[in-house]
Image: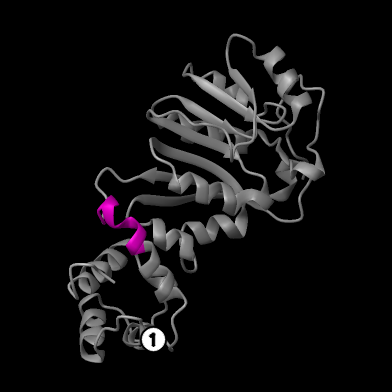
Amino acid sequence: MRTREHPSSSPFPGGRHELGQNFLVDRAAIERFVRLVAATDGPIIELGAGGGALTTPLAGLDRPLTALELDPARAVALRRRLAGRVRVEQADALRWRYPAAPHVVVGNVPFHLTTAILRALLDRAHWTDAVLLTQWEAARRRCGVGGSSLLTAQSDPWFTFRLERRVPARAFRPVPSVDAGLFTVRRRATPLVPESERRRYCGFVAAVYRGRGHGMAQILTRMPRPMSAARAREWLRERELAREVLPGRLSADDWASLWNEVRKGGPGGP
């Protein structure tokens, strides 16, 4: 099956390996990406614009659009081609100063930078929505398919993750060794845990993930500030969870409930 390529006047048809660049060229995937962005509101920040395969159709949404691109040559070419329509910044997405006002973050994220970029994004204020393309397995884990990652569990009280679709490797140039996943992240209007408790909550979740035991019933009794075996079993029954359930299988509501439970142990929390 041939890949349908998105028309572009970019003189750079493929990405640079040393920058982890694999550019999206499949029209259907690009159109789906743009539709997801169109469903959001506010100025758009694009990470890793590359040759502009996503930048050009995103500019058609008639919203303020800033495209970040690390490669100087590509940034110059994109700036010339989209002058007056897009603000192009030659910048590192991990170091650039993001606006202190509501905005949307989108991008085809270099696979080797997925965790670093997502961690930085989830720690950053002001953005409301994100539409991201990452390595398929990373997208599945972030969205809790087959079990949540530690990073997702630590973020669940403040964000919702939704897996949209799998994007085959042939949709990129150069063709990577693995498929990609398209997913969205939305900041909750009402957090499940107060922001003031975020640092302690994240530490608690990390301790649970690293805890010893064959399932939550045992793990919760072996924490630095343990829950009694009886209360651990009772909480699991209340949540309709098996004693052997693993941390990665807990939902956002489960984590918020568990945090509220352990906070009862004292004013300082766990």
Residue 264, horizontal then vertical, whole percent: 17, 72
Between residue 117 and residue 215, name the one nearer to us.
Answer: 117
- From what the image shows, is residue 134 above or below residue 208? above
Extent of the magenta region: 193-201
Judged by its main secondary structure, the magenta piece is helix
Instruction: State which quadrant residue 6 falls in.
Output: top right
Residue 69 visible in rendering: yes
- From what the image shows, is residue 239 above or below residue 181? below
Residue 237, horizontal then vertical, whole percent: 23, 82
Q: Is residue 57 magenta?
A: no
Question: Looking at the image, which residue is at 58% across and 58% down?
Answer: 138
Name the residue beneath numbered marker 1.
Answer: 244
Residue 167 visible in rendering: no
**Circle 1 — which element?**
loop
Q: Mark 1, residues whose alpha carbon is within 10 Å: few (<14), some, or many (≥20)? A: some
Q: Give the quarter of the figure containing the C terminus.
A: bottom left
Residue 144, horizontal then vertical, whole percent: 46, 62
Instruction: State which quadrant residue 66 falls in.
Output: top right
Q: Is residue 197 magenta?
A: yes
Between residue 14 and residue 196, name the one nearer to us.
Answer: 196
Q: Give the quarter of the figure containing the N terminus.
A: top right
